[in-house]
Amino acid sequence: MASAMKSAVIVFPGSNCDRDLAVAFEQVTGNRPQMVWHGDSELPQGLDLIGVPGGFSYGDYLRSGAMAARSPVMQAVAQAAARGTFVLGVCNGFQVLTETGLLPGALMRNAGIHFVCRDVALTVENTQSAFTARYEAGETITVPVAHHDGNYFADDATLDRLEGEGRVAFRYGENVNGSARNIAGILNDAGNVLGMMPHPERMIEPAHGGTDGRRLFEGLVEGLLARA
Amino acid sequence: MKARIFVTLKGGVLDPQGRAIHHALSGLGFGGVNDVRAGKLIELDLADGTSDEDLDAMCRKLLANTVIENYRIEKVA
């Protein structure tokens, strides 16, 4: 699928899924994303989609995502998000988005202490966002997780609000890491920012063992066309 | 001027690290431990005259994530 979508992937010291995310963006949008270094205070002009990748930015110093959230480029990402640019944070990227305040809550050490690295079943809870529009409501998909700090925490009022507003995008089909209400991914109130611990970019072609992640990216391409 | 910042998980927030430490203490034969909570100590060496407001802002903006953590500031002469 070719499109006019312009995308970028943010690269922090310690990012390690930036290239995987870039491959997914390129395969689905037809355009190669620009890789943007964390110290840049400006993003390329006219971006439609920004990826905040997985990894261990700044060695997870202080808290996962804490240092990256204060880097110059994240100020620019926050401004772009406020303008409606799609922002996808995966794994460490989700941690960065919560630390930045673009998404509520926090991601804590897995309740079982261990690093979890395997395919998990996810339920698609919301199909109203561009990220999830290509899925069926209630559909079960398979996407891998690989994280140590994926235990989603927010106070009950915040969790109730997220559920009430349909902002839980994905839920684990089982207790993977102790996350509150099995939440695997959430949207901001405008629906243009998604943070999720599982890695959709690792499930986009049959050689990956499945393609369930691909429709997330395809939905963004269609969402952009719908805006035009 | 120096300050010590104690960052701890809020009550009710699960602390897997504390639980693992607790388990290890039990393994060493220390039976009298009821609970363990792990936190962080961050020591700051500050210019004289750094305001309490600035110190508090440092904690809120970076040193602690107030969604899950509390902090306590202890100024050392």
Image (cartoon, coloured by chain):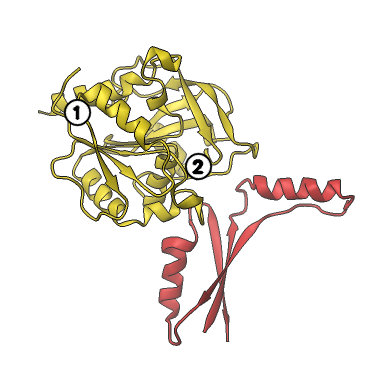
Chain colours: A yellow, B red
Residue A1 screen position, x and y as percent: 20, 17
Q: Is residue B20 above or below residue B55?
A: above
Residue A86 screen position, x and y as percent: 25, 36
The one nearer the camera, A137 or A67, is A67
Looking at the image, tell me whether mark 1 or mark 2 is earlier in sequence order. 1
Q: Is residue A10 left or right of residue B2?
A: left
Q: Which mark is residue B65?
A: none
Q: Which SS class for mark 1?
A: loop
Q: For mark 2, what is the residue?
A: A156
Q: Is residue A152 left or right of residue A211?
A: right
Residue B2 figure quarter: bottom right
Label 2 lies in what chain? A
Residue B17 screen position, x and y as percent: 67, 48
- Tell me the residue at 52%/38% (across/down): A150
- Tell me the residue at 57%/29% (across/down): A176
Residue A180 screen position, x and y as percent: 53, 36
Residue at the far top: name it: A206
Q: Is residue A157 left or right of residue A216?
A: right
Q: Which SS class for mark 2?
A: helix
Marks 1 and 2 sit apart, C-alpha to C-alpha, by: 41 Å
- Tell me the residue at 55%/64% (across/down): B71
Q: For mark 1, what is the residue?
A: A31
Q: Amino acid at mark 1?
A: Asn
Q: Please tell me whether mark 1 or mark 2 is closer to you in this view.
A: 1
Label 1 lies in what chain? A
Q: Amino acid at mark 2?
A: Asp
Q: Are marks 1 and 2 on the same chain?
A: yes
